Amino acid sequence: LKFLLSWWTMAAADAAGRALQDLIFAAVRDAVGPLHQRLDDLARDLEHVKRCVDSSAAPAAPSVMPASSEPPQKKLATACGSEPSESRGVPPADPSAKTVVQPSKPDPPKPAASRPVSAGASRMEQLAARLPPKQEKNVVDWVACFGMQDQGKDTPLLSVGNTVRVLKQDIARRAMISFIDEDDGTADVIYQSAAGDEGGTAPAGEEEDEETVKLQQIRALEEFESKTGLQKTMDENSDFFACCSVLKEQGNTLFKLKDYETASWWYGQIVNQFMSRELREEHWVMLMRDGSLELARVRSVVSNDLVNLVFDKNGKQMGLSNVSAAALVPVFHDHLLLQTSVYMNRARCFANLNKNQEAAQDLTTVIGLWGCVNVLPDPEDGAREAASEGLCKAHYLRGKTRLGRGRHDLAASDVKAAMAGNPAPALLRQIRQLERDIEISKKDTKRSNKKLAKEVAKWADAAMSNMDQATRDALDGAGPE
């Protein structure tokens, strides 16, 4: 009986082992099969992208400069914030020049301050090579930071490696397609930071944000978001402020698409161009003093980075020497509506991204700019009429961002300032609702603080009750020597 029982046990164990082995082999086969198929699909997609890139590569065509148009160096230098001059190493343009065909070849020798350019350099790169390093960086940033790399026109939208926009219920984001599953109707995407590199990878130290989305959520980027589209915008708008106005409208388009991250970055590049404008004597600027922005004038320019200022203090003129230009906000009194709208729109983007501190900083700048209207000698037409409404909106929005950070007293002061500006009925209702929200938040914070204080008191009592008498005596006797 024992022998039969032992034999039966061994046979059962052997059968179970074989069954388990079959199950493992089947599981491995089922897991590896789709993975192998997915790798084959990815290899085919990458080969397709490579063929499209190879087919779209073509030698640079000679550039033609019509006799009626401005020379590209002057046009682009104006759009980037400066006129070509002898001091910048760019000879003055001859308006009577005839049509010139410039084949792609190395540029002629430059002055000593110029940097070498490649044979096929674009007009932007040629201009950058003729400018001092600081101005060169602005030109390069204007193109390289704004525009993505151009995608092949013949490349299908749903292709691995394409940069697209993913639409969600409350927000949209730019992303790069990493895998497409047509059977399932989905795609794997890697979301891009708007200020990230052209390859779409996350900045150093940050993990890439990946997600699987439905193919119906994927849309093409706007035409102006490409490198070619940006250069077209700049070529068609030679004036700096006209170019900024067009770029602002493009940012508004991104805002309406609810791509707040890209829109905020788009507005931010315009702000950077405002900040990098060369300061000259009698230029109006704002500087932060005693927690608020004050209006001042440039008395003299010490260097590219330092200026001397003069401002009014209690009816007296005061001076400041060797002030860093990077700490100043230039005031363009003849383009005040454009300047304030860019800061205001970026603040709205930050607020939608729950970046309340950044939004509050931009709104403080808006309030400072509108506050300059009555001091500036000749502000832009319509600026005085728009200042009152602009101040009300800015104070209201800043109050909301401060409430989001729990700064109740500061939020209440913004509500008070917005009320004092005689806001329109619709805005007035929103301000009163914000006032009620502040009071509710105050009460909630007070209740939570009381609850926390009770919990701390209970914990302290429990800790004291568990101490022995010697420890209590030591604590009671502890004090300053």
Image (cartoon, grey):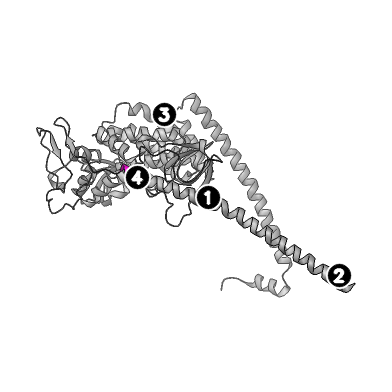
Instruction: Identify the residue at image location x=17%, y=36%.
Output: 64
Task: Identify which residue is drawn at 71% across, 66% down.
Answer: 464
**Residue wearing tag 1:** 37
In magenta, the rendered stretch is 53-59
The residue lying toward the viewer, choosing from 169 and 273, is 169
For badge 4, the amino acid type reads: Val
Residue 388 pos. (x, y %) = 40, 29
Between marks 1 and 2, how big is the CA–CA gap? Answer: 48 Å
User: Along the horizontal axis of the image, is 446 left or right of 413?
Assistant: right
Q: Earlier in the sequence, mark 3 or mark 2?
A: 2
Left or right: 18 in relation to 226: right
Q: Alpha-carbon distance for marks 3 and 2? A: 95 Å
Give residue 29's quadrant in the image: bottom right
Task: Look at label 1 and name its amino acid.
Answer: Gln
Compare marks 3 and 1 and give the one earlier in the sequence.
1
Q: Nearer the viewer, mark 3 or mark 1?
A: 1
Q: Is residue 213 magenta?
A: no
Provide the residue designation for mark 3: 389
Percent x, y for residue 199? Answer: 39, 49
**Disc on the earlier residue, 1 or 2:** 2
For the residues labelled 3 and 4, say whether their Cβ atoms are less than 8 Å apart: no
Residue lying at the far bottom of the rendered structure? 470
**Residue corresponding to mark 4:** 53
Sequence order check: which comes first, mark 2 or mark 4? 2
- In the picture, measured across the screen, residue 309 lies left or right of residue 256, that is left
- Closer to us: mark 3 or mark 4? 4
Q: Amino acid at mark 3?
A: Glu
